Amino acid sequence: MPSKAFFLMRLNDHIQYLKKIEATLEGKGDFYGTHHHECKLGQWLYGEGANEVATLEQSREAQKIFDSLFEPHEQFHTVSKKALEKACPEKNAKIAITEMYKLSQILTQKLLALDTLKI
């Protein structure tokens, strides 16, 4: 069974990734993102995530939430890449950044929902 803070650690992985993007957008970094399979959250989603979620007491509900993470996670990587592209016109970059934050919030809510099911 996942540890008490397990899903919060996955949330932290996502937040750290987002912070790297923000630093680059602010001109304070040189992070240009990864493929959605390569970040820590993606490695978990496409790796041990399903097995770990299956061990939860409310595994049916947890599996539903887990399955719903894939699409917004992939979209988050797509729009964050657009936001980071220097050739992107400013207006389009702002749209991408707004969408990136919306998707980030969806991912955050889903990971927090998983965290509440573990007990």
Image: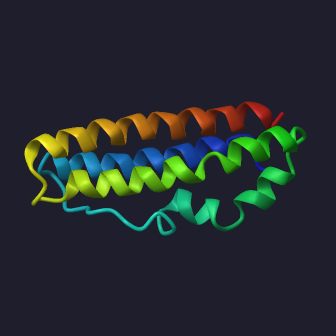
Q: Position of residue 59 (x, y in %)?
A: 86, 44
> Considering depth in this image, is 78 or 46 the residue closer to the camera?
78
For this view, does 31 lie left or right of residue 70? left
For this view, does 109 lie left or right of residue 16? right
Q: Position of residue 85 (x, y in %)?
A: 18, 59
What colour scheme was applied to this rendering of the protein?
rainbow
> Considering depth in this image, is 71 or 39 the residue closer to the camera?
71
For the point 22% across and 48% down, which residue is it?
A: 23
Q: Position of residue 76 (x, y in %)?
A: 41, 50
For the point 21% across and 55% down, which residue is it?
A: 84
In the rendered image, the quadrant that contains the C terminus is: top right
Q: Is residue 112 above or below residue 52?
A: above
Q: Position of residue 36 (x, y in %)?
A: 47, 63
For the point 63% across and 59% down, which residue is it?
A: 45
Picture quarter containing residue 8?
A: top right
Q: Is residue 24 above or below residue 46?
A: above
For the point 29% across and 35% down, which residue is it?
A: 98
User: For the image shown, how many numbered marks are present on the structure?
Assistant: 0
What is the residue that sits farthest to the right in this orientation? 57
